[in-house]
Image (tube, rainbow, N blue to C red):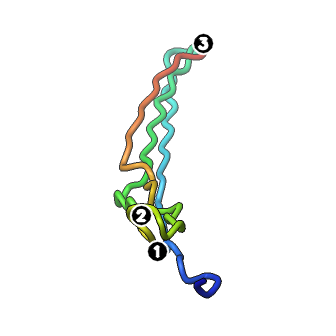
Amino acid sequence: MEPAGSNRADAHAQMDLKYVQNVQLGKRYNAQIDIDFFNVFNSQTGYSIQNQFHLANYSTPRTFFDPRRFQMAFKVQF
């Protein structure tokens, strides 16, 4: 047996950014540009620690947070 809380993941901080720009197209139409940045600093901290001592990779992370991503959308409103 091991003490409770001895298998902990590292702290994780993640910054996501969003930018939305509206562009008027004449009197009737509006265009919108939507840009998203996820995990700006690309911190891929592991979590879900392997806690079964009889399996391989004991006390190592089994999954990691998603890497940096970028997405952009464009829409026209009328």
Q: Residue 53, percent across and down? A: 49, 70
Q: Which numbered tag is attached to residue 45?
A: 2
CA gap, disc 1 and disc 2: 7 Å
Q: Amino acid at mark 2?
A: Thr
Q: Looking at this view, is 8 or 75 the one in front?
A: 8
Number of other residues with Cα within 10 Å of mark 2, as a class: few under 14, some 14 to 19, many 20 or more? some
**Which callout, 2 or 3, points to the residue nearer the camera?**
2
What secondary structure is marked by label 2?
loop
Q: Residue 38, percent across and down? A: 44, 48
Q: Amino acid at mark 3?
A: Arg
Q: Is residue 56 left or right of residue 76?
A: left
Q: On the rendered image, what quadrant is the N terminus found in?
A: bottom right
Location of mark 3 (residue): 28
The residue shown at (45%, 62%) is 55
The residue shown at (42%, 46%) is 37
Choose the circle earlier in sequence order: 3 or 1. 1
What secondary structure is marked by label 3?
loop
The residue shown at (46%, 74%) is 10
CA gap, disc 2 and disc 3: 47 Å
Does 53 sit above or below residue 56? below
Choose the circle earlier in sequence order: 1 or 2. 1
Location of mark 1 (residue): 10
What secondary structure is marked by label 1?
loop
Q: Looking at this view, is 36 or 52 the one in front?
A: 52
Task: Check whether the beta carbons of the residues at disc 1 and disc 2 lie within 8 A of each other.
Answer: yes
Does 62 sit above or below residue 4? above
Q: Amino acid at mark 1?
A: Asp
